[in-house]
Amino acid sequence: MLWNDNAPALFLCNYNDGSSTVKATRHRPSKTLTNAAAARAFFSGEHTKVIDEPLFAWLYNHFINAVDVGDQLKSYNSGERTIRRGGWQAIWNWLLHTVLVNCYLLSIYTTAEDHTKLSKEDRWTKQVIFRKKIMSAFLHAAGGNPGTRKRALLPLNQPQVKLPGKRHTKVKML
C-alpha cells in the first residue's frame, strides 16, 4: 500500500486492506521541512487539520516503537551464540512475545471455576509478574539454580610447574 504523507511511504500489511480510516489531527509542518511547500499547501493557512488517515498508517505512527524493537532485534541480536545474523531472530522473538502474551490472556480468561482453584500468588494481574513466574517455572523445571559457572581449565589457568635450578640453562644475549 502507498500512503503519501510528507513523502510517499510504502506499507506491507497483512491485517488491513487499506479501506479503514481514522480521524487524525495533523499539524502544519515548518517552512524548513523537506517538501514543505507541497505539505503546507494542503493546510491552506490553518495550523491544524483533521484528516482521514488510513488505519495502517495511523497504527504505524502510534506503535512505531514495536517496529524499531523488531529492527533492533533483527540487526543486533546474536542470541548470545556464534551464528549468522538474519531476519529469523526477529521473527523468533516476535513469535516468543506473541506466545507469552497469548498465554497471559488465556490465563486471564479462564473460567471462574478454574480461576478460584489458583492460589492468590498464582493469579496474575500484570504481565510482568506472569512472565517472571513463567521464567522461574522454566528454570525450576530445568534443574533449579545451578549456582555460579565454573571457569574452564585452560593452560593459562593451570599452576605453572617450577623446574629445579640445575635444569635451567643460562642463555647469553648478544
Image (cartoon, rainbow, N blue to C red):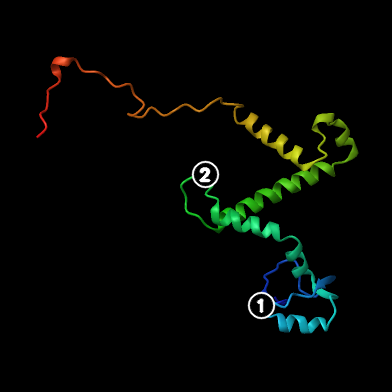
Q: What residue type is labelled 2?
A: Glu
Q: Which amino acid does label 1 sit on?
A: Thr
Camera-side residue of 28 and 10: 28
Left or right, residue 82 beside residue 73: left
Is 80 drawn above or below residue 75 in the view shown?
above
User: For the residue labelled by badge 1, is the local secondary structure a helix, a strand or a loop?
Assistant: loop
Left or right, residue 38 beside residue 46: left
Residue at the image position 83 percent from the left and 84 percent from the top: 44
| Residue 80's disc number | 2
Q: How far apart are marks 1 and 2 (CA)?
A: 41 Å
Camera-side residue of 163 and 42: 42
Counting other residues with Cα less than 10 Å from the Cα at mark 1, is it few (<14), some (14-19), or many (20 or more)? Answer: few
Residue at the image position 75 percent from the left and 40 percent from the top: 128
Residue pointed to by mark 1:
34
Counting other residues with Cα less than 10 Å from the Cα at mark 2, is it few (<14), some (14-19), or many (20 or more)? Answer: few
Badge count: 2
Q: Quadrant of residue 10?
A: bottom right
Q: Tell me residue 49's x, y (percent).
A: 85, 76
Is 167 drawn above or below residue 79 in the view shown?
above
Image quadrant holding the N terminus, namely bottom right
Image quadrant holding the C terminus, namely top left
Q: Do the residues labelled 1 and 2 touch (CB within 8 Å)?
A: no
